[in-house]
Image: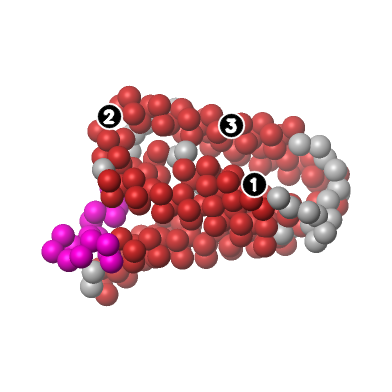
Amino acid sequence: MTLAVWLGFLLAALLIAVTPGPGAVLSVGTGMRHGYRAALTAILGLQAAIVVHLLIVAIGFGALLATSETAFFIAKLIGAAFLVWLGIQKWLAPAMPVDVDRLPVQRSGLFIQGLLVNLTNPKAIIFVGALVPQFIDPGRAQLQQYLLIAATLCASDVAVMSAYALTGRRLGAWMRDPQAILLQNRVFGGLFIAAGGLLAFSSRPS
């Protein structure tokens, strides 16, 4: 991969990351409630899912989702159901004041949540499947190119999701006001449910 090609891929990766989606909602919500370090755990889960997406594309399952209506429909429903479940849990969470600096956090749970948010989004797999092959030089070693692509995608996404999480962290004072907590639970719960609904009724990317 030449420098010019890599720069083009970097720009595409940044544009993908900046586009708001379930990962951004998770990053902002976790940053707001638990602080940046806890949000980073969820963000690393998002990156683990990106690596899995690349592996799926590399072995050809991305092509299956892109060509099989049934496979895409099943994967889409699983992803939508998970996002709606997250939204319901958030919506029903009690409006209890939180000290974001002292709150104990089960970080393994946040990592898994981040992993599943990205992993259950078939459109992400298809997008990676459509994007990555355009930047792969078939005449060069594949492994090194995939490693560079994985590093670029993950670094770009970590930077952007960190910005989202830090924005949420600045709003952490809201977590000491029960009314603000209730509003935050409803907003982020609604966003997750809306994301699940949009995914459930979306068409396969062309």
Disc 2 target residue:
68
In the image, residue 152 lies in the stretch drawn in magenta: no
In the image, residue 142 lies in the stretch drawn in magenta: yes
Question: What residue lies at 67% left-to-right and 49% top-to-bottom?
Answer: 29
The answer to whether residue 24 is seen in the rendering is: no
Q: Which mark is residue 197?
A: none
Work out which quarter of the rendered image holds the N terminus and state it.
bottom left
Q: CA distance from mark 3 to mark 2?
A: 24 Å
Task: Name the element at disc 1.
Answer: helix
Work out which quarter of the rendered image holds the C terminus and state it.
top left
Mark 1 crowdedness (10 Å alpha carbons): few <14, some 14-19, many ≥20: few
Which stretch appears magenta? 127-145
Mark 3 crowdedness (10 Å alpha carbons): few <14, some 14-19, many ≥20: many
Mark 2 crowdedness (10 Å alpha carbons): few <14, some 14-19, many ≥20: few
Position of 64 with respect to 76 (left or right) is left
Disc 1 target residue:
109
The main secondary structure of the magenta stretch is helix
Residue 72 drawn at (x, y percent)? 35, 31
